[in-house]
Image: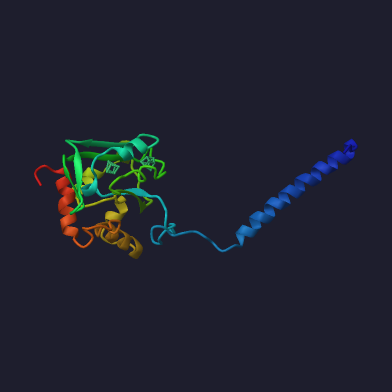
Amino acid sequence: MHRSPVREYFHNIWRTVYTILVGMRISLKYCFAKTVTLQYPDQAPALQPRYRGFHSFEIEKCIACDQCAKACPIDCIYIEKTGPRKLDKVTGIAKGGLMTRYAIDYAKCMFCGLCTDPCPTDCIHMGNLHDLSGYTRESMVVEFTDLAKEGLQTPQPIWMQKDKLPEWAAKKKQDWVDFAFSNDKLSNDNARRREEMVKAVDPEA
Ligand code: SF4
Ligand code: SF4
């Protein structure tokens, strides 16, 4: 539509004021809305049931077949073993060579979950931990074989290694210690699972 220069001038002023008013109306609406600030870590974050966090790895069931590493689109899973491993169907535990390394580089991982799908023994899962940080790139590589020696399937944030924790965090930590992710033949025998985890990585165990 053709406007005279004077009309165009005032039209531009009106458009400017109008768009500011629209923006301010939205800002004002949120000024008086109920706050959604979460006082983390005192309050638990609301994670969805199928949230994909840092992995949980059942090393005692891993047959070191490399399927997860091959499926990873960015090659951030590193597996080393001394020989082939085979799952004993009776005990549900893998035997054979040792797992000398199972590591994931979380500086690269995009939490897509593609590594979990092809696992023939269902021993790598997307966990429920969302909070892990480090000061160097090297510290972003989680060595699950080292965690297994401590009886852990998933890493823990530094702040969760303290004794005094908010109730929700203490429960989450206890779930990890109790292997809440594992639902298999060793479900009622945490001591035996810990023993088998160490045996999978330590030739002296
Ligand atoms: S979640 Fe995706 S990116 Fe991360 S290790 Fe698994 S396959 Fe690789
Ligand atoms: S696919 Fe499963 S069994 Fe195979 S190496 Fe990965 S975690 Fe281990």
Question: Which residue is drawn at the image coordinates 19% and 41% (left, top)?
Answer: 85
Residue 3, given in percent of the width and then of the height, sits at 89, 38
Residue 9, given in percent of the width and then of the height, sits at 84, 39
Most extreme residue toward the right is 4
Q: Is residue 97 left or right of residue 20?
A: left
Question: Which residue is drawn at the image coordinates 14% and 43% (left, top)?
Answer: 202
Q: Is residue 172 left or right of residue 101?
A: right
Q: Is residue 90 left or right of residue 127?
A: left
Numbered label tally: 0
Question: Which residue is drawn at the image coordinates 80% and 46% (left, top)?
Answer: 14
Most extreme residue toward the bottom is 167
Residue 5, given in percent of the width and then of the height, sits at 88, 36
* Ligand 2, image quadrant it occupies: top left
Residue 135, given in percent of the width and then of the height, sits at 33, 40
Most extreme residue toward the left is 204
Pick whichever, 119 or 158, lies toward us.
119
Find residue 10 and report its image quarter: top right
Find residue 138 and report its image quarter: top left
Pick whichever, 37 or 173, lies toward us.
173
Quarter of the image with the N terminus is top right
Question: Which residue is drawn at the image coordinates 31% and 51% (left, top)?
Answer: 157
Pick whichever, 145 or 39, lies toward us.
145
